[in-house]
Amino acid sequence: MGRAGVAALILLAACSHPRPVLSSKPIGKPIGVAAPLGLPLLPAAVTAETVALGRQLFFDPRLSLDASVSCASCHNPKTAFADPRRFSLGVGGNAGVRNAPPVANAAYNRLQFWDGRAATLEEQASGPMMNPVEMAHTPAGVERCCGDLAPLFAAAFGPAPDGGSPVSLERITRALADYERTLLSANSPFDRFFYGGDAAALGPSAQRGLKLFRGEANCAACHLIGARSALFTDGLFHNLGAGMNAEGEIADPGRYAITRRDADQGAFRTPSLRNIALTAPYMHDGSLKSLKEVVDFYVGGGNANPHRDPLLKPLTFLTGAQRADLVAFLKSLTGESKQ
């Protein structure tokens, strides 16, 4: 698919609808979301009712037009809520054009999707449902499909003021977002070593990899590690030259399709590295199959193009053993997860 086709799908996914909506404010008692070791405090409150409803919806294939695809189809709990396929399959077996980002810890993202086109988890949740390649629904259609869950919607958000159905797209997306806000993963070997003071939590190779990550390799310039917590992302957009076509051109405009700023050509959001060992394949287009390939890609300085980020420098001085240490460190970022 060419650049125009990718941009068209993105714009379709971002479209909103002008229909009247019900209030999506939960009526239950707000509860905090506890952050495990290594993650910052999450300034969000959910309710038990919205989380339970959101979990049910997350695994419900009726959110797709032909009842073949659920959120979990592309965000699999067994792979840290990512998709092990290079491109996810939507209704009718339609293939997308990007690798599905993990949902775990997405509550911390400043912007959602690889190109940042959604500002909230709620906006992100509606995108796939309305995307013709993914779930291919309409607002009215997805609301009808959830009609039998009306008692759960009423318990979470209250009845409709006019006595009609308490189900609405906005309530669906709020419930999904609240469930996703609870999908936090940390307390990894790295966290227990770095933040918990457990010297035995990280092996010698991973410790050497951590030193390289923060030092000579300069990985932490974009995959940030703070004094008290680490999201392993700067939340910004960078062009690495990943996903170039056979002619050496940028195949996917990335952030540029949203901002139309020339500097954003081929730029994509820095992903968190948490659970990275579970979320292959890598890059926005799933073009790298292993962590070794990822490290080698960075060692080579990515792929040259007019918009490549100046932060990206070749690391050809790294030996094979040092590259293996970096991989060992990345594997230490697999944390405990809730489903």
Image: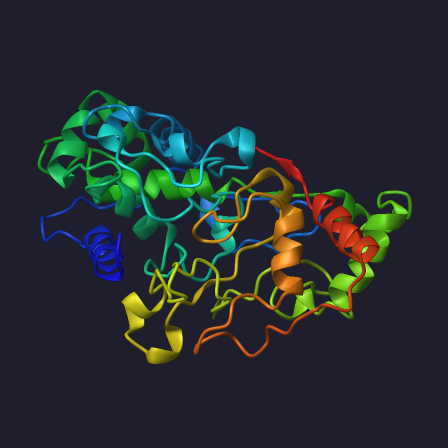
Residue found at the far front of this picture: 247
Left or right position of 2 against 46: left
Q: Please name the residue shown 76% across and 55% down the image.
A: 323
Residue 130 position by quadrant: top left
In depth, the one of 91 and 246 nearer the eye is 246
Residue 155 in the image: state x and y as whole percent: 31, 29
In the displayed structure, does residue 18 sit left or right of residue 26? left
Residue in view at x 18 percent, y 26 percent:
145
Is residue 72 depicted above or below 42 in this figure?
Answer: above
Tell me if I can see residue 6 in this picture.
yes
Q: Is residue 311 above or below residue 267?
A: below
The front one of 91 and 26 is 91
For image coordinates 37% across by 61% down, the residue present is 115
User: 215 left or right of 97?
Assistant: right
Residue 301: x %, y % from top left: 61, 68
| Residue that extends furthest to the top in the rendered view of this protein | 148
- In this rendering, position of residue 119 left or right of residue 62: right
Count how many numbered circles sit on residues in the image: 0
Q: Does residue 60 sit above or below 22 in this rendering?
A: above
Visible in this render: residue 26?
Answer: no
Q: Position of residue 42 (x, y in %)?
A: 55, 53
Residue depicted at 22% across the width and 29% down the height = 92
Q: Percent from the top left, x then y, of residue 9?
A: 23, 52
